[in-house]
Amino acid sequence: MSEPTADLAPLAFSDLPGWATAGHVAAVAALRRQAVAWGDGAPKTRALGIDGDRLARIARMAPATADEATARAFFEAHFTPLRVLPREGRPFLTGYFEPELEGSRRPTERFRVPLLARPDDLVDVDAANRPASLDPSHAFARSTPNGLVAYFDRAEIEGGALAGRGLELVFLDDPVDAFFVHVQGSVRIRLVDGGVMRLAYAAKAGHPYTSIARELIARGVATPDAMTADVLRAWLKAHPDEAPALMRRNRSYVFFAEQPDLDPALGAIAAAKAQLAPGVSLAVDRTLHTFGTPIFLDADLPLGPDGALAPFRRLMIAQDTGSAILGPARGDVFVGLGTEAGRRAGLVRHEPRAFVVLAPTATEADA
């Protein structure tokens, strides 16, 4: 288990500004969906110590329907707020979304950029099977007759390393859009021959994620404060000769799986095995935070229609993760689906005033 890297300071609910209107109905609904996803199981207790077994028992008690007062009373009766105080670094929030794009199940003159399924020679790596020669940061490797080796990276895969294996799930028309699907980890695709296809993260090649936005900042294309996802996307599309090499600087490559029969109002099924809820689901560092943990955020975020900063005092549920989401008070807010959600998500790069986990208290089931 990873070191906690943070202290947890007890609070009262009355210490949380905006707690009375923190979106408890949506949070209790997300927690209930999470309980359904767990079934009779429970999430693994992670380094910050939020007890997964106790959390699962309480989640199963969440009311099926509730008004704001009832939902708030549920959280106050079964949880204790603890402020996360990082021992190093600072709290930081970003936003992510589920893109909506056009695509085709078959390659055409227009649709030529594939999103791939997980290859059968891709192996999960942990302490039990990791060869000494494999970079410690790699969570996946390639199975060969001579043992596990590093998997192909983005440049090798885009260069044809997996060609001819029938891994293509769908084809997009723009390599920049495909790159951003890899970054977001899910996509809703309007198929040109009718219907909608939902894809979500299934695995990755194992190479560490590299921010190409930092490369453009280093080149002087934009300052850190001005660099947003929209700025990065616009530069890549305006420089088609340079964009492929820059995108390949990020050696990380994501594989996808189709997710049929999803609730269209919700996002994809994410790391915690439940569909994401816009404005409620939070991606966290999965080595530190137990999935399903309620987390109260107090921040000013640019999530209004005009991008203006507004108070964001919201109770969220930890339901996802990401390779760039590292640290005890690092969160990635799931903003929603489609172009407008993407625009707003790309503006979120802010430090919250408070990052508060709700620890489950003892229940009768613990006696």
Image: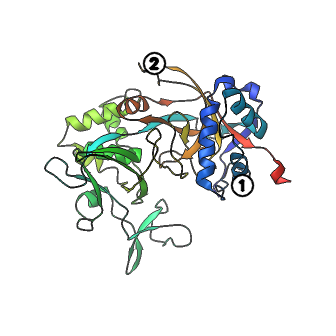
CA distance separating discs 1 and 2:
40 Å
> Camera-side residue: 194 or 356?
194
- Determine the secondary structure under disc 1: helix
Query: Which residue position is annotated with label 1?
Result: 53
> Camera-side residue: 217 or 111?
111
Side of 58 relative to 184 (left or right): right
Q: Nearer the viewer, mark 1 or mark 2?
A: 1
Query: Which residue position is annotated with label 2?
Result: 308
**At label 2, which amino acid type do we have?**
Ala
Task: Say if residue 50 shows up in the picture.
Answer: no
Residue 332 image position (x, y, % from top left): 51, 39
Instruction: Please determine whether, in this image, residue 27 is positioned above or below residue 256.
Output: above
Instruction: Please determine whether, in this image, residue 343 is positioned above or below residue 138.
Output: above
Residue 154 image position (x, y, % from top left): 31, 56
- Label 2 CA crowd tier, 10 Å (few <14, some 14–19, many 20+): few
Residue 105 image position (x, y, % from top left): 25, 54
> Which colour assignment does the render follow?
rainbow
